[in-house]
Image (cartoon, grey):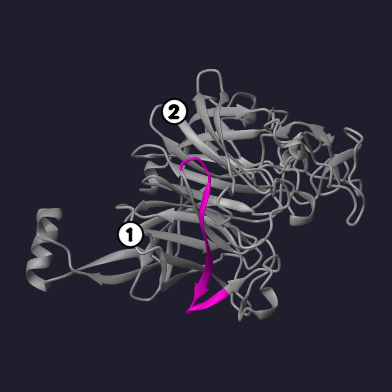
Amino acid sequence: MLRAKMILVPFPRLTSMKRLVCAVFGLVLVPALASAAEVSGVVTGYAELPATAKFTAPASVPAFKISGKFTGPAGSAPVTAFGSLPGKSQGRLTGLSLPMLGQPRQGYSDIQAMPGNIAWALQDNGYGAKSNSADAMLVLTQFKMDWVNRRASALKDILLSDPKKRMPYPIANSENNPKRYLSGTDLDPESFRFVGSSLWIGDEFGPYLVKTDRWGRIEKVIDTLIDGERVCAPDNPSFQTCRHQIKSSKGFENMAVLPGDRTLIAMLEGPMEGATVLKALEFDLRTEKWTGKSLDYPLDVATNSVGALTALDANHLLVIERDSREGTAEFACVSDDTSRCFKEPAQFKRLYKVSIDRTNGKLVKQDYIDLLKLKDPRKLSGSKQRNGIYAMPFWTIEAVTRAGKKEVLIVNDNNFPSSASREPNTQDANEFVRVDILSLL
């Protein structure tokens, strides 16, 4: 539906006829979209990291030699038999299992592109909860993208640590180890950005804003404030005394740094108690304090989440809004047996362009790209495309970054070993996709 609105238009941008109309009436009626419109995105590169990729923890911390020991039933003893806990995605077997020797490369919750087909990607807390991730290391990995061979290769790792004892509570492992490597029981890192010589991380357990040096060593753990009062999630030791309370796993999933590296915007994944919009909080990187300003983001559907955020320019952001469904219609269930099909295939996976309305404290949606319908005319994604269309039907898509003037790089969170969103019984790989978003700019 179109509506007309009055806009003053400078003469040089008009045809001679429109200039005549403007000269007579001093203005021109321009139709404006009443809501966001869908535009197309085009795949320009695809690289994959296999679901079985892993790395070896430092020998000095034997607690991390084996990963996944605590993923059994709640309250049970650590599991020691390799592969005895099968991975399941909404009840469907994924083909992989825990515990495992080594640390999996999985669960990418944010990404930042660098020149030369390089990108840094951040793993989340491990296995989805504070209680089951004490043997999952927190790691930021540098990748090289080989677009020709469709391969992402890990170059180096930064292991998050707390040698200066800045954490507000005792850490799960390495308490007596000088390097004090952190685990997924200590923090749930879901977003990050390099700013100068520092690394800033958004955490969900606090939620906290965490500052580290370039080697991932914590320098500050900053409480989240709204109107000068703390915001707490259930995993925060101070939850009961906090005025502002949020649900578990609804902390800082998303982060953007505006051009100039002065302002950081951290968005909560879920709404505050009693609210229907998401809060994006402004943080001053010079004073390292919350400014007290915030922006409201309206969800298309109340049960949706925002999985990723990045800056487009000083006045616009890119936002991935998604449902919690997974899978494609190709494998939709046609019977009551849902063990080898998708009962509820993905429906809503969108990359929005939003404008920053500072006057009214809002994020205003403009156009969007449907991530379930990315064009891939050159079939760069290989077997992942169907009839020239590449879809991202993943349960969670949590990372987007600018990758040049007109492209972005997106990667899924594959929730190892519990996400089979592309095929019903095959654990998802980590799919790095470069997308031309010129139509959105």
Q: Is residue 138 left or right of residue 293?
A: right
Is residue 219 shown in magenta? yes
Q: Can you tell which mark lies on residue 245? A: none
Mark 1: give few (<14), some (14-19) or many (20+) Cα within 10 Å.
Answer: some
The rendered magenta stretch, by its main secondary structure, is classed as strand
Q: Nearer the viewer, residue 38 or 54?
A: 54
Mark 2: give few (<14), some (14-19) or many (20+) Cα within 10 Å.
Answer: few
Residue 282: quarter of image: bottom left
Q: Image height check: is 96 above or below 327?
A: above
Q: Residue at x 73, y 40 (%)?
A: 416
The residue at the far top in this view is 149
Q: Nearer the viewer, residue 50 or 93?
A: 50
> Residue 36, image x and y in percent?
45, 60
Q: Which residues are magenta?
A: 214-230
Q: Residue at x 60, y 28 (%)?
A: 48
Is residue 193 shown in magenta? no
**Element under disc 1:** loop
Q: Residue at x 90, y 38 (%)?
A: 80
Task: Report which residue position mark 2 lands on.
Answer: 117
Decide which of tag 2 and tag 1 comes sooner along the chain: 2
Q: Is residue 3 left or right of residue 75?
A: left
Task: Report which residue position mark 1 lands on.
Answer: 315
> Residue 265, image x and y in percent?
44, 61
**Element under disc 2:** loop
Q: Are marks 2 and 1 in contact (CB under 8 Å)?
A: no
**Residue kind at label 1, given as amino acid type:** Asn
Q: Image height check: is 146 above or below 21?
A: above
Q: Residue at x 55, y 18 (%)?
A: 149
Q: Nearer the viewer, residue 119 or 159?
A: 159
Check the picture and name the quadrant holding the N terminus. bottom left
> Residue 213, image x and y in percent?
46, 46
Report how far apart the C-alphas of labels 2 and 1 lie in the structure.
Answer: 27 Å
